[in-house]
Amino acid sequence: QVQLVQSGGGLVAAGGALRLSCAASEQTASSIIMGWFRQAPGKDREFVAAIGGKYGRLKYADSVKGRFTISRDNAEKSVNLVMNSLKPEDTAIYYCAARDGTVVFDIASRYEYWGQGTQVTVSS
């Protein structure tokens, strides 16, 4: 059973940057997919970005392309999300997620393991 522990996030003004990190409790297989989702009040959980497998396949939501960067450190058993040029509409609780397999899905129900969530607030 993989446990994911998140850190980072917080409050930033529009145009600013934040970094989220997610550490796995045990060594994850190189083929495991890790990603980020977010959920704003009153809205469904939505895909943000994911990175997968030993070839590091990347997938981003259109709304964050060019602004967010996902990276993974297999040695550190962690995945990071650097968020630049933040907008008020990026405000949400961000969740780290992981799934066994080699396909990078952008659907929350495909992910088996979840972090505790961390608040990101972007002021206008």
Image: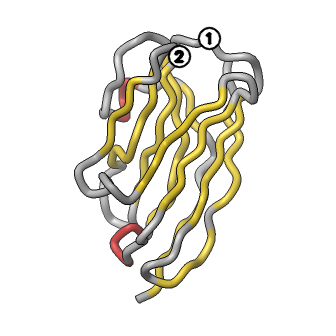
- Indicate the position of residue 44 as horizontal and vertical percent values: 31, 52
- Indicate the position of residue 9 as horizontal and vertical percent values: 62, 63
Task: Check if mark 2's residue and mark 1's residue have beta carbons within 8 Å.
Answer: yes
Considering every residue shown, the one lying at the far left of the view is 62
Q: Nearer the viewer, residue 35 or 16?
A: 16
Q: Nearer the viewer, residue 17 or 110?
A: 17
**Side of 7 where 119 appears, left or right:** left
- Indicate the position of residue 115 as horizontal and vertical percent values: 61, 40
User: What residue is shown with label 1?
Assistant: 29
Q: Nearer the viewer, residue 93 or 33?
A: 33
Q: Nearer the viewer, residue 68 or 45?
A: 68
Three-letter amino acid code at the position of disc 2: Ile
Question: At 42% from the left edge and 54% from the top edge, which residue is drawn?
Answer: 68
For numbered disc 2, what is the local secondary structure? loop
User: What residue is shown with label 2?
Assistant: 32
Neighbour tally class for label 2: few under 14, some 14-19, many 20 plus, Cα within 10 Å: some
Displayed quadrant of residue 43? bottom left
Question: At 33% from the left edge and 48% from the top edge, which residue is drawn?
Answer: 46
For the C terminus, the image quarter is bottom left
